[in-house]
Image (spheres, helix red, strand yellow):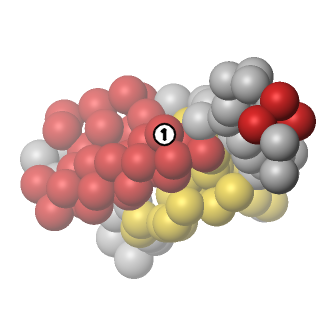
Amino acid sequence: MDATCIDQTTPQPVRRRPRLRVRKIGEVRLPLAGPYRPRARLYLYPDGRLLWHVRLWEYDRPVSHLFRTETVRAFARINALARTLAEIDELTQRALAEARRDA
């Protein structure tokens, strides 16, 4: 093979195709009142946002709410829920690791 035929351009990094779907990372039970413990589900959005989805009862039906991680952490901290706070932090770290891996 002739050396003049070899392409001398610098190699380009291969880009991964960005994920276009919202991914569920995990969930935590939030102890609100007595036996009422709704699930707070953490989702990683394609743009890198982390949002918690919680369905709370309002009158006669559940209503979906989205919260930032800071809000869910504040709830756990104010109510002295150390175990719940640790679970929230663990899921958040897992989501951030996945976001870095995809970048």
Q: Quadrant of the C terminus?
A: top right
Work out whether residue 12 or residue 35 is closer to the camera in this orientation and state it: 12
Q: Is residue 94 above or below residue 50?
A: below
Q: Position of residue 96 (x, y in %)?
A: 43, 42
Q: Residues within 10 Å of mark 1 (few under 14, many from 20)?
A: few
Q: Secondary structure at mark 1?
A: helix
Quadrant in the rendering for residue 84: bottom left
Identify the residue at horizontal 19%, vertical 35% (top origin). 78
x and y percent of residue 77 in the render? 18, 38
62 with respect to 76 (left or right): right
Residue sitting at x 34%, y 70%: 34
Three-letter amino acid code at the position of disc 1: Arg
Left-right relation of 88 to 23: left
Name the residue that disc number 1 marks. Answer: 100
Q: Is residue 40 left or right of residue 70?
A: right
Estimate the x, y position of residue 3 in percent, counting from the top left: 76, 37
Q: Nearer the viewer, residue 1 or 97?
A: 1
Asked if residue 59 is positioned above or below residue 78 in the image, the reply reads: below
Q: Give the residue at x 51% y 47%.
A: 101
Where on the picture, by quarter, is residue 20?
Answer: top right
Q: Is residue 18 rendered to the left or right of residue 55?
A: right
Residue 24 seen from this side: yes
